[in-house]
Image (cartoon, helix red, strand yellow):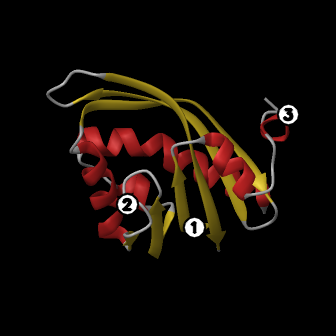
Amino acid sequence: MSQENVEVVRRFLEALPRAQASGDWRAVLAEVDPGVEIDDLDISLDTERYRGHDSVRKWIGDWMESWESWSLEDVQVRPVGEDRAIGLFLVHAKGRGSGIELSRRDALVCTLRAGKIEKGTYYNDQQQALEAVGLSERDAHAES
């Protein structure tokens, strides 16, 4: 089951930028439970949770308000027990209006049920995400 979860999270992460660019969210929504809950520690400051399929689009839309463009690179996903997986990736973004460019290593910790993402917690600091799931950076990259 853990390898299946890894693939679900990988497909989800790889589909996000394509969905934002094209407006076609089917590939993203195929990987998430209808009641999915996203907690973005980067933009919500722990005050807002995004719930449900429509909220996935809102979550990315809220993030995009600040960015003219963005991409995810070097996506690596590791299992964390039987029902969780952590996605580690490099985010590149260009500020809307300012043109400021950002590159940072972010992470998404997902809890899965029945082959769908049920909960996701987004971190703008991979080390913080790794600590949250009880891994070190060395553990997370051991199979890379």
Q: Residue at x 55, y 69 (%)?
A: 119
* Pointer 2 or 1: first along the chain: 2
Q: Residue at x 37, y 53 (%)?
A: 43
Q: Quadrant of the C terminus?
A: top right
Q: Quadrant of residue 101?
A: top left
Q: Which residue is mark 3?
A: 142
Q: Type of residue at label 3?
A: Ala
Q: Left or right? Give the position of 72 relative to 116.
A: left
Q: Type of residue at label 2?
A: Ser
Q: Residue at x 80, y 66 (%)?
A: 82
Q: Left or right? Give the position of 83 relative to 58.
A: right
Numbered marks: total:
3
Vertical placement of 31 versus 77: above or below?
A: below
Q: Left or right? Give the position of 51 relative to 130.
A: left
Q: Which residue is mark 2?
A: 44
SS at circle 3: loop
Report the Cα–Cα distance between label 3 and label 1: 25 Å
Q: Which residue is mark 1?
A: 116
* Pointer 3 or 2: first along the chain: 2
